[in-house]
Image (cartoon, rainbow, N blue to C red):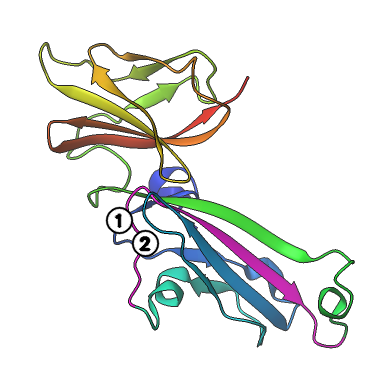
Amino acid sequence: IDDPETGGESLYDYGEEVKIDISGSKNYDLWWLSIGEEGADYNRYKSNGWSLGSIEEYNLTNFWDYPYNWEFETFHSYGVQFVVENKACRNGIEHPETSWNNLKRVFVICPEGVGCRLRGNAKEILVAPNPASTIIQLQNFIPEFDGNYEVKIVDLAGNVIKNTRLYTNEIDVNNLPEGIFVLHISQGSKHIFTTKLVIAR
C-alpha cells in the first residue's frame, strides 16, 4: 500500500501507519491475520484468530499496538500473513491438507522518519543495478572528501551484514549472500539515504 511514497510495498517510515490492501478478498467472509517480527532484540508474534466479515483495507499499526503498546521498530522486519476462507466451506480449516487463500508480505521499517529517502530537496539517490551481484553504484551521490560517510547493509532479520566507511559512489556487494536487504547511508549521526537492496546471482 506504500508504493507511491517509497517505491515499494516493503519499506515504511518509522512512525508511519502500515496498512495492507486486501480488497481482492472481498468475496470471502472469514479471515485470519498474523504478524511475526524478526529483529536484533525481538521475536514477537501476534494473531487475531478467525474473524467473520469482509474487509478491503486493514491498519496493521493499530493491530500491532493493541493491547501491548507495541510499535514497529527501525530496521526490524515483519512478516504478514492474511488468510481468507468462506464460512460455508472452511476448506483450509476443516481440511488443512488443502490449499489456503494466503497472502504473505514482508516489510521493513526505515529510520528517523524520513520516508526511506533523502532529506530536503536534494536529488534522490538511485542504486544500480538493483538486483545486484558484485558492485553497485550510488547515482546522484558524490561523497565529500573526509565526509565521514558510512554504509550499513542489514538483512530482514535485523542483522548487520556489512558496515564500512564510504569513500566513493561504489559499494562492493560481492561477498553478500543472495536475498533482500536494507541499505542505509549516514554521515556521522545524520541520515542520508535508505533503500531496499536485492542481491541475486
Question: Image point 89% across, 66% down: which residue?
Answer: 97
Disc 1 versus disc 2: nearer the observer: 2
- Residue 171: tell me if it is visible: yes
Comparing 19 with 200, the one in front is: 200
User: Is 122 in front, or is 113?
Assistant: 113
The amino acid at mark 2 is Phe
- Residue ID for mark 1: 14
Q: Alpha-carbon neighbours of circle 2 within 10 Å: few (<14), some, or many (≥20)?
A: many
Mark 1 belongs to which amino acid?
Tyr
Quadrant of res 68: bottom left
Q: Going by the image, does 179 lie left or right of 118?
A: right
Q: Which mark is residue 92?
A: none
- Label 1 to label 2, Cα distance in Å? 7 Å
Question: Mark 1 packing: few (<14 Cα in 10 Å), some, or many (20+)?
Answer: many
Q: Position of residue 98 (x, y in %)?
A: 89, 66
Q: Position of residue 105 (x, y in %)?
A: 59, 55
- The range drawn in magenta is 69-88
Residue 197 vertical placement versus 86 (above, below): above
Q: Quadrant of residue 158?
A: top left
